[in-house]
Image (spheres, rainbow, N blue to C red):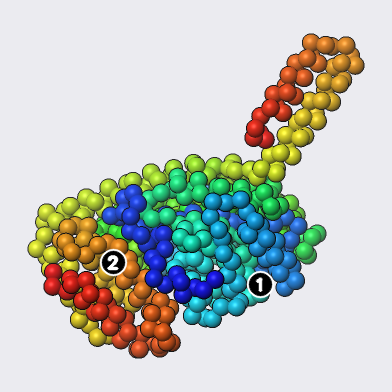
Amino acid sequence: MTCQFCDAAATVTLTEIVNKHKRVLRLCDRCAKKKKLFADAPGAASPQVDVPALLSLFGAAGPAAPPETAALTCPDCGLQYGEFRATGRLGCPAEYDAFRPALEPLLARIHRADAHAGKTPRAVRAARRDDRLQELRRRMAAAARDEDYEEAARLRDAVRQEEAADEPG
Amino acid sequence: MNLDSLLPNLGEWLRGTGPESDVVVSTRIRLARNLAGFPFANRAAPAQKAETAAKARDALAKADLPYQLDYVDVPALSPLDRQFLVERQLVSRELATVLEGPRGVALDQKESVSVMVNEEDHLRLQVLRSGLALTEAWEDIDKLDDALEARLGYAFHDQFGFLTACPTNVGTGMRASVMLHLPALGLTKQIEKVFRALQKINLAVRGLHGEGSRAFGDLYQISNQVTLGKSEPKILSEIGEVIETILQYERQARNALLKERRQAEQDRVARAIGTLGSATMITSEETMELLSAVRLGIHQRLIEDLPATTVNQLFIHTQAAHLQKLMGQPLDGEERNAARAKYLKAKLRELGSTRP
C-alpha cells in the first residue's frame, strides 16, 4: 500500500463510513505528520488523533458537514460547533447532547462505535437500581390492588433480590 | 513536597523488573475524568478552575486508598522542577509548560500513581508499572477511580460514557500504553512489520523520542486509539495480544543477531560502553542510542557486570532537568553535554565496567 499523497509506504489508514458508503484514505508517516493528523508532543502521555486535522482531511475530500451543524450552539457554555471544529476541543459536557447530530458521525469515524460499553460509575449504577426498585414496587402495588397475588409475590421476590445484591447492578 | 527527594529514586516504571522486562520497559494506563456541572478546563474561567482544583484536592486527600497522594501545585514550581516531572513521566508537557491557571499533580511515594488536575480534562488518573502488567495496572487504576468517584460527581452520559473535552477520549476515557525496547527489530530493519501488525487493529505506535520510523533509543510506545464501544478489559486484552506478537518478533530478531553476527554485536556493545565512558561532550540523543545498545547487550548476555537497572538510571539521570538537579546548577546546551559526559564517565568508572 502506498500513500495517497506521495509514493512512500502507507502506515496510516483512515476509514470513513457514512450511510454504508465507505471511503479509505491511506497516508505514510511523513504525510500524516505533515497534515498534523496526530497531536505530536514528544514525551506526551499518549498519541492522539487530531480532530480538526481529521475533519479537514475528510472535509476536503468528501461531502461537507450539513450546513445546520455549523450553527449549533451549546445552551450551557455558549460554545458554537464551528469553534469546536477549529480547536477539536469541546467546552462542557452538555455539548454531547447539544452537538449530537454532528458528533455521532465523528465518533463513528474515530471509534467505529456509537455507544459506551465499559465501566459505569457506582453512583450511576445506584441511581439505575433505585429506578428499577421504584418501578418494581409500583407494579407490585398495582398487582395487589388488582388482587393478582401470584404476580405481586413474584414482584416482591424480585425487589428482595435486587435489594440483597451487594453491588448496584 | 520537596521534589528533590525523588531524585535518587528510580520511579516504578524504571525499576527494570516485571514481566517480559527484557523487551517491555513499562505499562501505563490513564483515565480521563471530568466533574459534572463544570465547563471543561480549556473553557473554564480561573475561578471555576480554582473550584475544580479545590474539589479534586479534597477528594485526593480524603480518598480511601492504601497509599497517600501528595499534591504538587504546578504554578508554584520552577521551570526546572516542571521539566523534572515531565522527564519522570508524572505530568504531561502541556500541564507543565503550556497550560495556565490552577493546576497540579498528586503523586504516591513510589511514583506509580499520579493524578493530574486541570489538564485537558479535570482529572487525568495514571498508573505506571514496570514490565508488561496491563491487568495489574487496570486493577490499580480501577480502584483509584472508584475511590475518587465516591467523593466526586463525574460527567457521565448513558450513551457516550465518561465525557471528555476531546471526543477521541470519550467512553472509557482510557488510554493504555506499553513502552517497548525494540533494538533488534530496528537493527534488522523489520520494524515496519510491527507497524503493519498494529495498523490492522487500530493501535498506535510511535517512538518515544525523535522522528521517523526508527526512534531514538529504540523505544516505542504502543497504545489503543479507540475508547468508545469496547469495555476496558476487551481493549486491554487486544493490546496484550499484539504485544505478545511483537515480543516474539523482537526475540526472534535478537536470536538471529546472536547466531549470525555475535562478534559484531559484542563489538557494538563494547564500543557503546567505551564511548559512554570516555566522551567529554555528549548529547542526550547519542546517550540514548548508546544506552540502547548497552541495554540490548545486557539482555543478550554480551556483558556480565552491568545490571539493567543501571542503564535505566543513566537514561533518566542524563536527561536535561535531572542533570541540572544532580549538578546543582542551571546549564545551557553545551554545558549540559559536557556535564552529561562527566556524569556518565564517573558512573561507569564507579561500576568498574569501562573495561568489558
Same-subunit check for callouts 2 and 1: yes
Q: Position of residue B116 (x, y in %)?
A: 58, 64
Q: Which residue is mark 1?
A: B102
Mark 2, secondary structure of its residue: helix
**First of labels 2, 1 by sequence position:** 1
Q: Kindly indicate the quadrant of the structure image that contains residue B27.
A: bottom left
Sort mark 2 into few (<14), some (14-19) or many (20+) by Cα contacts within 10 Å: some
Question: Closer to the camera, A105 or A132?
Answer: A132
Q: Residue at x 11, y 54 (%)?
A: B259
Q: Residue at x 67, y 49 (%)?
A: B150
Q: Kindly indicate the quadrant of the structure image that contains residue A7.
A: bottom left
In the depicted structure, whether residue B318 falls above or below residue A18: below
Q: Position of residue A134 (x, y in %)?
A: 81, 30
Judged left or right of residue A28, residue A94 is right
Separation (CA) of disc 2 from disc 1: 37 Å
Q: Residue at x 73, y 51 (%)?
A: A97
The amino acid beneath tag 2 is Thr
Q: Which residue is mark 2?
A: B310
Q: How many marks?
A: 2
